[in-house]
Each structure stands twice: as structure tokens, then as C-alpha cells.
Amino acid sequence: MDSDHPPPRDSVRLGPDLVLARPESAFAERLMTACEPPGFPPGGVVIRSDPAYLFLRRNPPEDEVHQGGAITTIWDRDQVIQTAVALSRLIWPNGVWPRYAARVEREDDGSRERITPPDGGVGYRAYVANTSLRRWLDRAQAEQLAGLLARYREIRGRLPDDGRIRSALFWGEYAAQTYYVEIRLTHVVTALEALLNTDSRLATPQFALRLPRLAEELGFGVSRTFTNEIYGARSKTAHGRRTPLGAATRQARQLARAEEILRAALRKAIEDDSFRTACETPEGVGARWGALPPPQPCGGGASS
């Protein structure tokens, strides 16, 4: 564990009913036991380490849904925890995923406890592109996350469901759940396109023009070669090999840099009103990161 940046020792309040907390070892063991399949024969020795922290929501809404006469358990049905986890990656790239997701019911005096995982578990996990980095938030970053979540709650209602920023957030989190470099890079480029591209007929020139300018604004320097290569990689995904994260390849390094740019852009879109306004319309994008020249009329003449 990185001794210079340990996980928070004390709880950090992330919202009205959400905290990031380090669990007691005994509770962590009960939670992990409840969430992991027992195998057969049961009772085998399992070696586990305590999680760095938990995203803990107090008094969540009911998670049972009646569908076709059956009762289904939907964990985090309003996605408060999953949103916090996704936005935590904008603060620091981390591989947190709900492996040990459950609803915990406990008497006030602690005399009874029930830990219920969701039906079928939660069907995804997450990965970090730069595998040399620590995979958790430290105290300062957890406090930054609290501020980012507060800001997101303020603006969330003003973000169209099919809008550019929500689309980029979706593809960015989808990329975090992808293990292979080539496929993950495609999702990251799609997220950047959601922010930058405004005309489907001129996709490549827009991306080539605007990504370097966006990166410069965010404090990153990228070349035209970098931009062309990551954009061109999209069309090669179906025809090339699949490289796992952590490989020492040029494309893996490009992926790590592209993710840095995307994370910074999404965070700024949440925190900065003028940046978010620019992202939301084609006119704003063109004014801030470059407008393409108008299309030239086709040649030819008319005869009578």
C-alpha cells in the first residue's frame, strides 16, 4: 500500500446519506462471506484482505421490485452509489467495483444483522489503464469527490439525458469497465467525440482540430500524430489483436494519456459553468475549440 497516500482513516461524508468509510475487519469479513459463492464443499479456507473503504449509503430506498408476479432485488436502484463510484474515477483512476455489494439491515443495538447481496450480483467490474498507479482515493481526494458530487447534484437536472456530457460520462465509465486496450481506447475516443464532434460528415477533421486544443486548455500537450492514431485505432479494433491492460505498448501509453484528457474534461464540465456551456452546443464547441471552414459548393455550371 502507498504509505504516502493511504486510504482515509476516518469517514468522509459524500452526500446527505452517503459516506466513504473504512470498515471494521469483522464486518468486512461478514460482508465478503455473504457476497461470495460458498463453493462445494463449503467451509474451505479463503484468504482475503479487507477493502480499503466502502461506499456506504444509510437508509436507502427499498430495493425489491415486483415484476410479473415475482419479486426481484435491484441493488442501488437509483444509482446513488454507482454514480459516486463513477465520478470518483474523475478524481483519481481507480478500479473500485461492486464486488461486495449488499443491503445490510441491522437492529439499532446491533443484536441482529442481515446482509443480502443483489440477485445475481452486480454484473460488471472495473480496471485501471495505468496498472502502476495505486487504486484507491486518499483522504484529500475523497474530500474532492464530496465536492464534485455536490456540484453534480446541482447541475444533474440541467443535463439532457441524450446530451453530450451525459453521453461522454457513459462512455467514459464504460471504458473503465473494459480490460483490453484496443476496445477500451475505442470507448474513450467515443467519449471524447461526444464532447467535440458536431457534424457526422466531418468526423475526422473535427477531432484532429479540436482534441489538441482541448488538451492544451486542460494542461496536456498532444501531437497531431497522437490524435490521428487514437482516432484511426477505432476502425482497426475488429481486425487486430486484443492487448490486456498493463502491456508496455505504444497504444497502451496513448490510452493512458487519452483517459487523462477525458477525465479532466469531464470533471471540468461538472465544475466549470462556462466549460460546460461550451460543450453543450455545436456553436459553443466551435467557438471554444475551433470551427471548421464551411463546405465548398460543388463545381459545375448550368446550361440553358
Image (cartoon, helix red, strand yellow):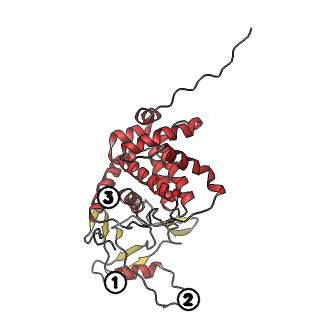
Crowd rating for badge 3 (residues with CA inside 10 Å; few <14, some 14–19, many 20+): many
> What x and y, as percent, mark residue 188?
50, 52
Say which mark, if any, is on residue 40: 2
> What x and y, as percent, mark residue 215?
41, 45
Residue of label 3: 145
Q: Is residue 249 left or right of residue 91?
A: right
Q: Residue at x 32, y 76 (%)?
A: 23
Q: Which residue is drawn at 42% across and 34% down?
A: 284
Compare marks 3 and 1 and give the one earlier in the sequence. 1
Compare marks 1 and 2 and give the one earlier in the sequence. 1
| Labels 3 and 1 touching (C-beta < 8 A) | no
Residue 205 vs 265, above or below: the answer is: above
Q: Which of marks 2 and 3 is in front?
A: 3
> What x and y, as percent, mark residue 202?
57, 36
Amino acid type, residue under disc 1 in the picture: Ala
Quarter of the image with the C terminus in it: top right
Q: Which residue is drawn at 38% across and 42% down?
A: 276
Amino acid type, residue under disc 2 in the picture: Phe
Q: Nearer the viewer, residue 288 or 119?
A: 288
Residue of label 1: 26
Q: Which of 225 and 270 is in front in this view?
A: 225
As helix, strand or loop, the secondary structure at mark 2 comes to loop
